[in-house]
Image (cartoon, rainbow, N blue to C red):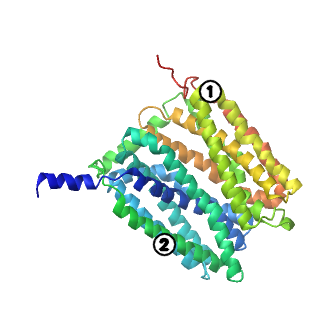
Amino acid sequence: MSKDNMNTIGRSTKRTPWAWVPTLYVAEGLPNVIVMTVAVVMYMQLGMSDSEIALYTSWLGLPWVIKPFWSPFVDLYKTKRWWVLAMQILLGSSLAGVAFTLNASFWFQGTMFFFFLMAFSSATHDIAADGYYMLELDDHDQAWFVGIRNTFYRLAVIFGNGVLVPVASVFQLEFRDQKAFAWSLVFYGLAGLFIALWLYHGFIMPRPAEDKTRQSTVHEVWSGIKKMFVTFFTKFPTKQVVFAMLFILLYRLPEAMLTKMTATFLLRPNSEGGLGLTPLDYGLANGTVGLIGLTVGGIVGGMLAGKDGLKKWFWPMVCAITLPDIVYVWMSFAMPSSLFVVSTCLFIEQFGYGLGFTALTLYMLYYCKGEFKTSHYAICTGISYLGLMLPGMVSGYLKDAVGYSTFFIIVMGLCAVTFLVSAFVKVDPSFGKKVDEG
């Protein structure tokens, strides 16, 4: 074969990022929202109590907590592209597994097994997809497409909350309230979607020259992991490290208590203390309007911090992630029936969360500066996710014991913990601030 022909073949494998970035991040976002949110609604409709739902679905977050421990092996074995494709076919298989076991006598054990497999596959897919993104794109394209990837990730979340739940409701009406059968149809459809994504990405995703198996020994990998963790906990004085870990772990404590109970509060009937929204209304209010508020809040937070630095906006962001939770207290007492009012409340709370979450994200970036910054950021996100998982496990028991109204009042009281851990962290005043040239 001539050199010209070889060059032509080489050029033909280079495809525009538009061909794979949007679909790759849909594949990253959809399993997360299915495991962490859609599963909550499904189990509620299948008759489980809030205590059971909160405990069991919170355990499904464990793979995202511990993924830093196995992320080095994604670097060591095979290529990032191989891991992406392997996890997508595994995600499709786990979705089909949920669909298949929903109508079995062991439906709960079966669905939990496949949801956990889905969570593990999704966490591993996150590692591989982000690594592939950085290998295939140069610095300019990485910066340009970061907004595109985040947008399609959010669209996947909207699809999970705003489309899947209403579709399951339509199937339930069509098949005379056979809830398990209706949900199995939804999951069979999702399995087909992921198989299609696997086939598409197998054809369309380029093969970066840098995407290759590293020739590191197992001993070298373990030595690298040890050094990574040692430097993580010794980069600042001990007291500052302790305060930083408490901040990362507990900053979202009120939100961690709310996360699992939000869906049940919106969907359960008035007789059980909920607002009694229909699945369609839930999809619009929480899955669409609420997520728009979250996205806008995140954008505003990034703009403010980018202009004036994190330190200037730190305390307004702390207030934003806590004080708007008061809307749940009001709704639990007022029990509004207007979808507009409910949607407005959810927009306000989610806007505040998006704005306030900026402070945590930027602080983790600040803490992780220096060597191993990618791995250290993965550790920070794992600790932060642990701060969501553990309170989420007990939130259902607490709510069942005291009812929604008192539960939301307690959540407001826990906002004091966020203020307390925020008071002891230190941030460089210049961090995040735009540097004037000239």
- The residue wearing badge 2 is 192
Q: Is 109 or 200 nearer to us in this picture? A: 200
Residue 320 sits in which quadrant? Answer: top right
Disc 1 + disc 2, Cβ < 8 Å: no
Above or below, 406 relative to 159: above
Judge the density around disc 2: few (<14), some (14-19), many (≥20) Cα neighbours within 10 Å.
some
Give the residue drawn at x 29%, y 52%. Answer: 213
Q: Residue at x 51, y 74 (%)?
A: 96
Name of the residue lying farthest toward the left: 2
* In the rendered image, the vertical position of residue 429 relative to residue 212, given as above or below: above
In the displayed structure image, the side of residue 308 where residue 343 appears, left or right: right
Secondary structure at numbered mark 2: helix
Judged from this view, the residue extending furthest toward the top is: 438
Relative image position of residue 203 (x, y in whole percent) = 34, 63
Q: Secondary structure at mark 1?
A: helix
Residue that mark 1 sits on: 311
Q: Is residue 436 left or right of residue 327?
A: left
Give left or right: position of 49 versus 406: left
Image quarter where the N terminus lies is bottom left
**Is 315 positioned to the left or the right of 146 in the image?**
right
Q: Nearer the viewer, residue 309 or 225?
A: 309
What's the amino acid at mark 1?
A: Lys
Count of marks overlaid on the render: 2
Find residue 12 and report its image quarter. bottom left
Residue 318 percent coordinates (x, y) = 69, 36
* Residue type for callout 2: Gly
Residue 184 seen in the figure? yes
Give the mark, 1 or 2, whose residue is nearer the N terminus.
Answer: 2
